[in-house]
Amino acid sequence: MVLQLKTLRRAAGYRNRDLFAREMGVTARTLKAWECEEVNMPLAMACRAADILGCSLDELAGRSRDEDGYFAVDERLVEIRKNFETLDETGRDLAAGAVRGIAGATARGRTQDEHNEDATA
């Protein structure tokens, strides 16, 4: 993810960093540090910036939407979502149960692996 603060600020008509900094209640130097990603923008300030710019936090963070309008973090999740939306209620219940089962088995496997490591140490 690449912070889109500068791009969104300009698109919103704030060509001058000083004007937007004033609107945000910070110095132009602080704004520049956020735009250049020299320092992380605090969440409260990111929320304020998103409100002023009329965008979402996801858009500010540079996350892109897939064709269905979801913010894609992992391509596998996008694929799961697409397939899930094609299922009827019974299929959705079965899919949810399968995912719970896989998650439980994975967690048990990690616990067993940790136990095995402790036993051999």
Image: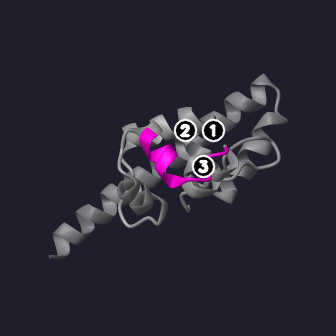
Q: Nearer the viewer, residue 40 or 24?
A: 24
Element type at marker 1?
loop
According to the image, label 1 marks what residue?
Answer: 55
Q: Name which residue lies at 56% across and 62% down.
A: 2
Q: Name which residue lies at 63% across and 38% down.
A: 55
The quarter of the image holding the C terminus is: bottom left
Element type at marker 2?
helix
Prevailing secondary structure of the magenta residues: helix
Q: Name which residue lies at 72% across and 50% down.
A: 78
Answer with left or right where residue 104 lies relative to residue 25: right
- Cα gap from disc 2 to disc 1, whole angstroms: 5 Å
Q: Residue 118 placed where, x, y %?
A: 18, 68
- The crowd level at tag 2 (other Cα within 10 Å; few <14, some 14-19, many 20+) is many
According to the image, label 2 marks what residue?
Answer: 50
Proximity of marks 2 and 1: CB atoms separated by less than 8 Å: yes
Question: Which circle marks residue 76 in the picture?
Answer: none
Would you place residue 15 above or below residue 120 in this image? above
According to the image, label 3 marks what residue?
Answer: 9
Type of amino acid under label 1: Cys
Point out the tag, 2 or 3, that comes first from the N-terminus: 3
